[in-house]
Amino acid sequence: MIETKTLGRDYIRGERALTVLDDVSFIVQSGEFVSITGPSGSGKSTLLGLLAGLDRPTRGSVWLEGQNLNDLDETSLSRFRGSRIGFVFQNFQLVPTLTALENVSLPLRLQDAVGADEKARQMLNRVGLADRLNHYPTQLSGGEMQRVAIARASVIAPSILFADEPTGNLDSGSGDRVIDLLMESRKHCTLVLVTHNPELASLADREIRLRDGKVEQIVTHRKASRTGAKKKVAATASPRAKSKPAPKKGNATRSSTRKAATGKGGGQRPARSGKKKAAK
Ligand SMILES: Nc1ncnc2c1ncn2[C@@H]1O[C@H](COP(=O)(O)OP(=O)(O)OP(=O)(O)O)[C@@H](O)[C@H]1O
Ligand SMILES: [Mg+2]
């Protein structure tokens, strides 16, 4: 279960505090699929980062499975995230210097899990990338990178999966495939998904609509269940895909999430040619 209590987040700009989230309170039940929607700048990514413990609130609290994240220090929070939380970024956030297989096995390696490579291989097989194990991110298409990102988020069998506009930059075919994978994942976990796509948002049990950093409305689409009917959604219906494909630079949530999801701060991209590792 996820619970937020009067959650707020300010950013300091010059001498002024800018409130981007305020008084956000809701509960997401275990196994529920909730979408978060709202205009650009309404605070969706900020909220997702706070829910996943990638960013700290200015006010209020986030409780995940009975644990108040405010009570965890960075080490405990990182351990908590590493074992229970999967996060799929709109812009993939794969480690450029690692192959697909290494990217997916990384969260397991950080936990010293046994059989990390084999589990990662199986997960990549499930997302249809068995023949891309040794490709670097630069050698993958956008849809393939996003599938690697989903595999990486899912490989730890998280109890909660967060996804921030996972189809935002994909064509409709790749987007539909990503949606299929997320709908499959939701059978095993709580899914919280940010999207600009109204059709995708309406697949959720409930939709939390944000406006100007506040919850404007919570819409129930169907009774919470893990077996809701699935329908195909054209990813390109997303207004964001058309109007705002590039990520914002300098967003603290995004930079902190890269670190959190990968355990690394990034690195130099290998050249497309020449650095590819030998096939395992
Ligand atoms: N690190 C930061 N420093 C200052 N302001 C920030 C920072 N990160 C986000 N903001 C501001 O907070 C507001 C909400 O940003 P957020 O990224 O959460 O919006 P969003 O709803 O996800 O928008 P989009 O749909 O465009 O992704 C924006 O006005 C943004 O400029
Ligand atoms: Mg966003």
Image (spheres, rainbow, N blue to C red):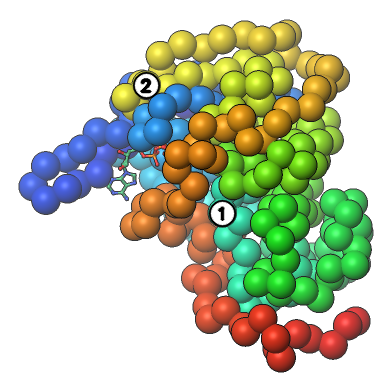
Q: Residues within 10 Å of mark 1 (few under 14, many from 20)?
A: many
**Residue type at mark 2?**
Arg
Q: Is residue 67 left or right of residue 273?
A: left
Quadrant of residue 142 within the rendered picture = bottom right
Q: In the depicted view, which residue is nearer to us: 117 or 148?
A: 148
Residue 42: where, in percent of width, then height?
A: 37, 30
State which quarter of the image contains the N terminus: top right
Q: Amino acid at mark 1?
A: Asn
Give the residue at x 52% y 78%. Answer: 267
Q: Are marks 1 and 2 in contact (CB under 8 Å)?
A: no
The percent coordinates of residue 179 (x first, y second) are 75, 36
Mark positioned earlier in the residue sequence (1 or 2): 1
Q: Residues within 10 Å of mark 2 (few under 14, many from 20)?
A: some
- 266 sits to left or right of 236: left
Direction bottom: furthest residue: 274
Q: Position of residue 167 (x, y in %)?
A: 64, 41
Q: Which residue is mark 1?
A: 91
x 57%, y 67%: residue: 263
Q: Which label belongs to residue 105?
A: none
* Residue to which mark 2 is pinned: 211
Dot 2 falls on a residue whose secondary structure is: strand
**Quarter of the image where one finds residue 61:** top left
The residues tagged by marks 1 and 2 sit, at their Cα atoms, a distance apart of 23 Å
At 65% across and 72% down in the image, what residue appears?
138
Residue reaching furthest to the left: 15
Q: Determine the residue positioned at 88% across, 54% down.
A: 128
